[in-house]
Amino acid sequence: MKFLFVHQNFPGQYLHIVRSLLEDNKIRDDTHEIVFMTEPNNNHLHGVRKVTYARPPKSPLEVHRDAGDFDIAVRRAEAAAIGACKIKLLGFTPDIIIGHHGWGELLNLVDVFPGVPILGYFEFFYRTENADVNCDPEFPLAADRLSGVRAKNAINLQALALQQHGQVPTRWQLSTYPEWARGSLNLLEEGVDLALCRPDPAARERVLKIGGMKVSPEQKLVTYVARNLEPYRGFHSFMRALPAILSARPDVVVSVVGGDEVSYGAAHPHGPWRQVMLAELGHRLDLSRVHFPGKVPYEQHLKLLQRSDAHVYLSYPFVASWSLREALACGCVVVGGDTPTVTEFVRHDENGMLVPFLDSGAIAQMVLRVLADERLAAGLRRGARADAERRLDLNAYLAGYRTLIEQVTGKELITSTSVVRRRSKIPHPA
């Protein structure tokens, strides 16, 4: 089968499914031809033909503030279509196009490859209520900016208008889409590599050293992970919980992984959120026990999760992070915020503990509780891993992905030894 993957940051969400397809080629030569179209970057995968398209320039014209994202998206759609035309001129016509709808790249490909099915990744449908907007009273959105929230769905709506096929990674994210759109969207719950993301009980018996942080077996490690440290991932609530935790437990060491850029929401006018929160908390924090390693290599990320005694995961009602799935698979004691992003994964007192997302006092109390009650913590660790084995198995995810590809294309993939095939129909829940 011929595949065209499209993502502006190769390989994006598609690393695992591409690897699965490459495994097919080991079983039978030339089973699949895989082309990946992307903006220029330095990443490569052996067996994948990477094709870059020109990064679209900024608009030379002034556009309405609500239309800025869409202006960039249609320029990217144009650039991707030009790149696709060059691929077609070289004699390549895919059997399926798989890509992410977030940046507009797929919007014009129906014109380049008419009749070729598109399986697009739909991540989130923006709402002005009952989701991320104005869920945090500390950062209210002015009424005259609500139009900008609705305008962010312009790409979503254009993508839905293609009348193609879609995938969504969680039930909550699927529920954000209008009811009329859900029939074209497949729930394909993403998994993690359970052999890689696994508990390591011996991790608490040895010294952990990462950067300037050193954690001995006698100490307790509290972990927090986000791509970037910002309110959308509850960074402000977590930081405000730390003085009480550090004061009550002199044996606690804290690791706060994440960068100082902005992934979601707005930047603070006075600098990175890390600096803002450190300035707010001042002398109330013992910074000799709070470590900010920035963005760490994946191997170190897993070592932190495996050593963690309490892992705090907070999020606005928004897209779920891979780190939450990885934490559960590693058997972390997860203290999670009570938003639907988290509660889809964490069940209170079964595979984690839930607290009010914005209540720093409640976060601190729960962290102290799980640190003090080893019997509770051990049960939560077992529950987290067992639930991950039921719901977050990468092999099951890949099997479902392959089944969905077969349904979309009407063509059967060979049975790969890398996944356990699952022939059941992909669900379309309301």
Image (tube, rainbow, N blue to C red):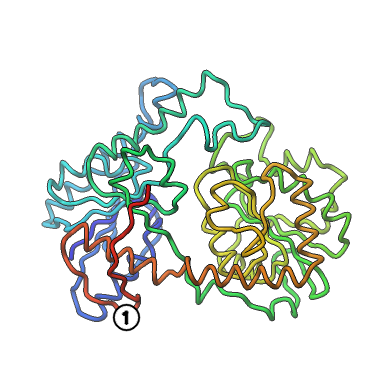
As drawn, 28 above or below 70: below
Q: Residue at x 35, y 39 (%)?
A: 179
Judge left or right: residue 200 versus residue 51. Answer: right
In the rendered image, which quarter contains the N terminus?
Answer: bottom left
As drawn, 51 above or below 297: above
Indicate the position of residue 299 as horizontal and vertical percent values: 57, 70
Quarter residue 410 falls in: bottom left
Indicate the position of residue 423 as horizontal and vertical percent values: 27, 69
Q: Which of 207 and 414 is in front in this view?
A: 414
Quarter residue 159 falls in: top left
As drawn, 425 above or below 148: below
Q: Residue at x 36, y 21 (%)?
A: 61
Judge left or right: residue 128 versus residue 377. Answer: left
As drawn, 44 above or below 106: below
| Residue density around tag 1, few if under 14, some if 14–19, many if 20 or more, within 10 Å | few
Indicate the position of residue 351 as horizontal and vertical percent values: 62, 64
| Residue that numbered label 1 is attached to | 417
Per the image, label 1 sits on a secondary structure element best described as loop
Q: Which residue is drawn at 35% across and 77% down?
A: 418
Label 1 sits on what residue type?
A: Thr
Quarter residue 59 falls in: top left
